[in-house]
Image: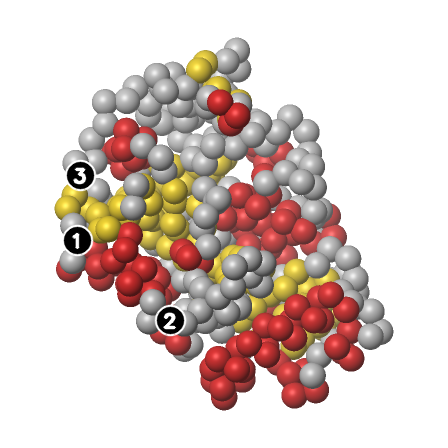
């Protein structure tokens, strides 16, 4: 089965060419001199980086066109991303040097700090504390399709997928099915291609520090807020009980488990897509729902909504899906909110005890 992909939004062709030529991408993020606040998007973005594994495909979305970048270079056992400078808690923990610096580009304003630049307007000062590296093993870098080609194909599935819900996000993970469709379109029905050559004065200045589990938390109990827990578990599956680890499955995060609706789609925190695909790899085989407080009525009803919709949509096939609720304890009423016919598909795991229920 394909290793899935990353869907990355860009806003200008010069930046696209720079990333294609150098085989590097770094999301613009707000510098973090201390611990990110609970409202910060820092750990949510880190969780996307954490989902990377060697071989995952990289696609860039720009002006209604989708370009192929390459495949991720790095680990296939934990997060395959790199740490760039010290403007993040991970960067300080790893004592990471700054090896990629876009502050010299004409489109940004320089600041007094290396690696920090004024992105303009309300965006303010940004940096790139994390990087991915990719290489083109398909001989397709710079090849593109029109985005409608993808969305016409996805119209065959009567429910939302990650690439339908990227609005407002810098990048997201996409399912094996979306990845396969994109690769097929780019190989057989591409609209054109651009030369992956840039005249920008930016390149790697040395080897970036790869993420290692030693730089992260030592236990689930150390991770706060919830997005930090999500990022930590995806980046380092060794934090999970052995039976909950992905074991080679494709990892995606914030996957819609919901019918189409105007807002407030139910999205599962972490999903594994394994070789025994469900609905061509659009529906996960395993769902992890994560909590940093005792799981009670709200968590139970969320899981119940997942299962009601999955069974309504898939019928008997939905019985193959496993759901783990991973929390520091459960209220005594948790089970009472989930229909008895669904209970055998739900496993409660209390990470303060390392025990399952």
The relative height of residue 355 versus residue 130 in the rendered view (above or below) is below
Q: Secondary structure at mark 3?
A: loop
The C terminus - image quarter: bottom right
Alpha-carbon span between mark 3 and mark 1? 12 Å
Horizontal side, residue 15 vs residue 143: left or right: right
In the rendered structure, the answer to whether residue 149 lies left or right of residue 298 reads: left
Q: Which residue is at 44% across, 69% downward?
A: 159
Residue assigned mark 3: 194
Q: Residue shown at 46%/55% (left/top)?
A: 165
Relative to 252, residue 357 above or below: below
- Judged from the image, the secondary structure of the residue bearing numbered disc 2 is loop
Report the number of discs: 3
Q: Secondary structure at mark 1?
A: loop
The 10 Å Cα crowd at callout 3, few under 14, some 14 to 19, many 20 or more, is some
Neighbours of disc 2 within 10 Å: few (<14), some (14-19), many (20+): few
Residue at 48% x, 44% y: name it.
Answer: 168
First reached walking from the N terminus: tag 2 or tag 3:
2
- Residue 356 picture quarter: bottom right
Image x and y of residue 130, in percent: 48, 36
Q: Residue furthest right?
A: 332
Q: Which residue is mark 2?
A: 157
Q: Could you tell me which quadrant the N terminus lies in?
A: bottom left
Tag 3 and tag 1, C-beta contact below 8 Å:
no
Q: CA distance from mark 2 to mark 3?
A: 31 Å
Where residue 92 sits in the image (x, y, percent)? 61, 29
Quick check: 346 above or below 288?
A: below
Checking the image for residue 190, the label placed there is 1
Nearest the viewer among 82 and 176 is 176
Residue 252 shows in the view? yes
Name above or below for residue 244 compared with residue 335: above
Q: Report the Cα–Cα distance between label 2 and label 1.
A: 22 Å
């Amino acid at each position: 089965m394909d290793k899935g992909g990353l869907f990355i939004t860009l806003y200008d062709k010069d930046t696209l060419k720079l990333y294609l030529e150098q085989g590097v991408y770094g999301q613009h993020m707000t510098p973090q001199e201390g611990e990110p606040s609970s409202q910060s998007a820092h750990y949510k973005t880190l969780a996307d980086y954490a989902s990377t594994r060697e071989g995952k495909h990289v696609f860039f979305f720009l002006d209604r066109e989708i370009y192929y970048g390459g495949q991720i270079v790095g680990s296939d056992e934990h997060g395959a991303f790199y740490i760039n400078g010290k403007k993040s808690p991970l960067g300080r923990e790893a004592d990471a040097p700054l090896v990629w610096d876009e502050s010299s580009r004409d489109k940004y304003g320089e600041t007094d700090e290396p690696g920090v630049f004024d992105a303009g307007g309300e965006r303010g000062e940004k940096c790139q504390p994390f990087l991915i590296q990719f290489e083109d093993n398909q001989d397709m870098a710079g090849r593109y399709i029109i985005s409608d080609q993808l969305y016409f194909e996805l119209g065959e599935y009567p429910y939302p997928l990650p690439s339908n819900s990227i609005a407002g996000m810098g990048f997201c993970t996409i399912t094996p099915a979306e990845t396969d469709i994109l690769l097929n379109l780019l190989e057989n029905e591409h609209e054109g291609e651009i030369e992956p050559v840039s005249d920008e004065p930016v390149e790697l200045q040395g080897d970036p520090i790869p993420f290692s589990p030693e730089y992260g938390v030592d236990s689930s109990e150390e991770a706060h807020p919830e997005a930090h827990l999500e990022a930590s578990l995806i980046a380092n599956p060794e934090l999970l009980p052995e039976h909950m680890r992905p074991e080679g499955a494709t990892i995606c995060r914030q996957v819609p488990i919901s019918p189409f609706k105007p807002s407030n789609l139910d999205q599962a925190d972490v999903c594994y897509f394994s070789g025994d695909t469900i609905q061509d790899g659009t529906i996960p085989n395993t769902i992890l729902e994560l909590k940093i407080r005792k799981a009670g009525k709200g968590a139970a009803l969320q899981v119940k909504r997942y299962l009601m919709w999955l069974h309504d949509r898939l019928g008997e096939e939905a019985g193959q899906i496993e759901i783990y609720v991973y929390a520091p304890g459960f209220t005594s009423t948790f089970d009472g909110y989930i229909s008895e016919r669904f209970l055998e598909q739900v496993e409660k795991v209390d990470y303060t005890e390392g025990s399952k229920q």
